[in-house]
Image (spheres, grey):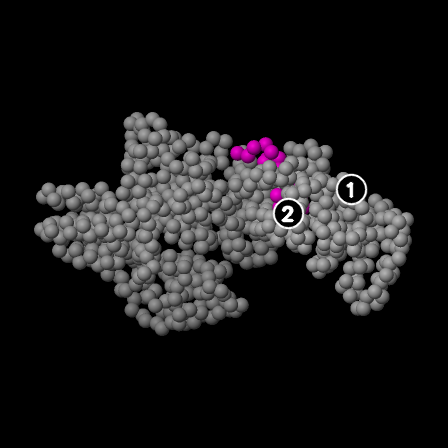
Amino acid sequence: MGGTHSIELSGKQSVVLASLLLNVNTTVSKDRLIAALWDKPPHSAVSNLHTYVGQLRKSLPTGTRLLTKGSGYLLQAGTEEVDLLTFDQEVRLARLEAGRGETESAVERFKRALALWRGRPAEGTPLRDDLLAGLAEVEEWRTQARLDYAELQLRLGHSPEVTGDLRRLLTEQPLRERTWYLLMLAYARAGQRDKALDAYRQARDVLVEELGVEPGEDLKRLQAMILGGNLPSVTSGPQGGGICQLPPDIADFVGRKAELSSAIEALCPSRQQATASEGAVRTTLTLPLCVISGQAGVGKTALAVHVAHRLRRDFPDGQLYINLRGEDNRPTDPEEALGRLLRMLGIDGATLPAGVEERAELYRGKLANRRYLVVLDDAADEGQLTPLLPGTPGCAVLITSRRRLTALPAARMLDLPVMPPGEASELLRRLIGPERAAGAPGEAGTLVQLCGGLPLAVRIAGAKLAARPHWKLDQLVTRLSDARGRLRRLTHGSLSVRDGLAVGLQDLNPPARRLFRLLGLLEAPDFAAWTAAALLDMAHTEAEDLVEQLVDVRLLDVAGRDRTGQARFRFHDLTRAYARERAEADEPDDERLAAVRRVLSAWLALTHQAHLRWCGGDHPVPRVRSVLWSPGPETAERLVRDPLAWVDAERAGIVAAVSQSAALGSYELCWELASAATHLFETRGRYDEWRTTHEIALHSAHASGDSLGQAMMLNGLARLRLARGDVSRRGDHAPARYEPAAGGLAPATGLGTEITVR
């Protein structure tokens, strides 16, 4: 900045300066700067950042405007103060002049713009992924400017001056066909026909070896013209990147650095070629495919569009986009989709062939050996996609879908999760303004938590607050804290979390829809497939298939595997709220109650079996009197074969089942389940779960007047004190706790009243 002023900076200071210069006149959040400085930020990261910025302010020329803005920093500068801004302005003006036929003036502007480059930007600065990606984009701007400059020089007849720069550019990036084209043309116009044809052979060798593709039609046509003694005129202006059908990029796009990097790596091996170190170059002989999958509202389309815009310069022939409406009642038919894509490519609609096969052949022919990026948004399944895939690896395809689409060959699968709290908070800050968020950091964090990190929900919350600048954040927090009304309030204009969730149900069969509704009634934080079998009163394998349907459409998440070997599943909080909402609206009261009681009794049946396997006859419990539902002998054997693995897997579910049994008035089942789990909890040292279940069940038994239940729970609580050593710490309270238990056990069970306290 400021001309020739030279300053000495440490590595960390130079990283901060590079971040601010790459985003000049834009506020850069502290979170982004910290991420640029450290892979694992120290506890003193914020304090250290303040120090680096303070040192920068002292080192930069007088008059430099490095301002603190909310939760970030802003480097303000005029066009003439920053080379990158000057370069960008000069290149844009040069292209406008070239388009008006003012070639000589345009050449002079390009020359001035390129003269601003002195070495590589931020050379010697220790940069991380986000900054490296930004610098790669800046380098790409320079490359395109060099090519535009060379083309205009050829138009003026300056062929000898062009060849040296084109050769240097090919040494850096040998996969650009446009560079080879201009080099061949420069040699041919300089009368060096042999060098022009040799350049074609070199271009073909490198494209075949590195990408597995033949040169494009432009290179082949130019070779044929040179062989025939004819040369094309250089009348076209600089290439503008072909057609672009992409929706606008997301102005407030936040985070997703790992997914962004992975998608770019999958789709653009040539970019990897340009940035990889020697020996780490990737090549591809297959069509690059990347599938972004995830639940409704998680930001699949936003990420895909952002990636596509980042890659525009890597696909100079164009970027095609089509919404396949895979989650609608009527997804876009492949024949219709091909018709739209072909019209984008300039085919007259009146001449389009009928039928999928003929349209697909024409489509593949139009894309063959070209560099197109095709974005297929909201795909239904692999069958819908297959006719829409190009046939040559020079193109690339970016797909979004709720389903994982694992049948696509050699596709990179990106499973998009909800946003981490930091990224979700940054999104909210950008939507409502950093000052407003900084003024109520606790409420902002609570809002993000109530939205479950779902970008759509955070965006709706932010839009509501932006539309109501007079609201305090806690007003929206209060409204969203009501779980039953949360979905109703998470709507704004055309945005709705509920609508996105409803779409996921459309393709499910009736049993899967019913399972979705009933699972929403459970209080357990996660669950295995046997709970689905109990809810629907069906065989385990059939229920497991229905669970997988819910996973496929992203209405359930896979939480991992438990110690019994069972896959465990969970809802996103907002999805659970929608499932419960649908259950209360669509399921009769008696059927809802019967389904929940079945699964609660299954928890009791399996926990009782686990108790018997672990304790045998050493620690008898009263005979279970509740009506039980069991998943069947083989499934039960598999689940409780290792009783301690069972209690490890189901401890949270047992606590939730005890609580839900009490809430439903199933008092006997409540204390029987608590009693059955006692020795398992004791063995595992799960004292908190032991205490919680017994206190809930004791209150339940007392409310129902069940003397046996009260006695068993008092007995269990007294034993818990002994197990914890409360007798020695607090005095001999255990005998007093046992006395009412003994009085209740004698008449209720006939087991006797002898209780020994050791």
Q: Quadrant of the N terminus?
A: bottom left
Q: Which of marks 1 and 2 is in front?
A: 2
Which residue appears at 87% of the width and 58% of the height? 755
Going by the image, does 268 lie left or right of 113?
A: right
How many circles with numbers are drawn on the protein? 2
Residue at the image point whose x is 28% and y is 37% from the top: 366
Look at the image and say whether residue 341 sits in the magenta stretch.
Answer: no
Callout 1 secondary element: loop
Residue that carries the numbered disc 2 in the rendered image? 638
Question: Measured from the top left, where is residue 498 in percent x and y?
Answer: 57, 39
Residue beneath the point at 32% across and 57% down: 281
Distance of label 1 from label 2 (alpha carbons): 23 Å
Question: What amino acid type should be assigned to the residue bearing mark 2?
Answer: Arg
Any part of residue 169 in sight: yes
Q: Along the horizontal axis of the image, is 705 left or right of 476? A: right
Mark 1 residue crowding within 10 angstroms, few (<14) / some (14–19) / many (20+): some
Instruction: Please name the amino acid that badge 1 sits on.
Output: Ser
Residue 18 quadrant? bottom left
Nearest the viewer among 346 and 698 is 698
Task: Identify the residue at image location x=13%, y=42%.
Answer: 225
Residue 626 is labelled as 1
Asked if the magenta segment contains residue 511, the reply would be yes
The magenta span reads 507-529
Q: In this view, does 277 lie to the left or right of 479?
A: left
Q: Position of residue 466 (x, y in %)?
A: 53, 48
In x, y percent, where is residue 252?
Answer: 45, 50
Q: Can residue 693 be seen in this view?
A: no
Q: Looking at the picture, tell me which residue is in the foreground, 67 or 124.
A: 124
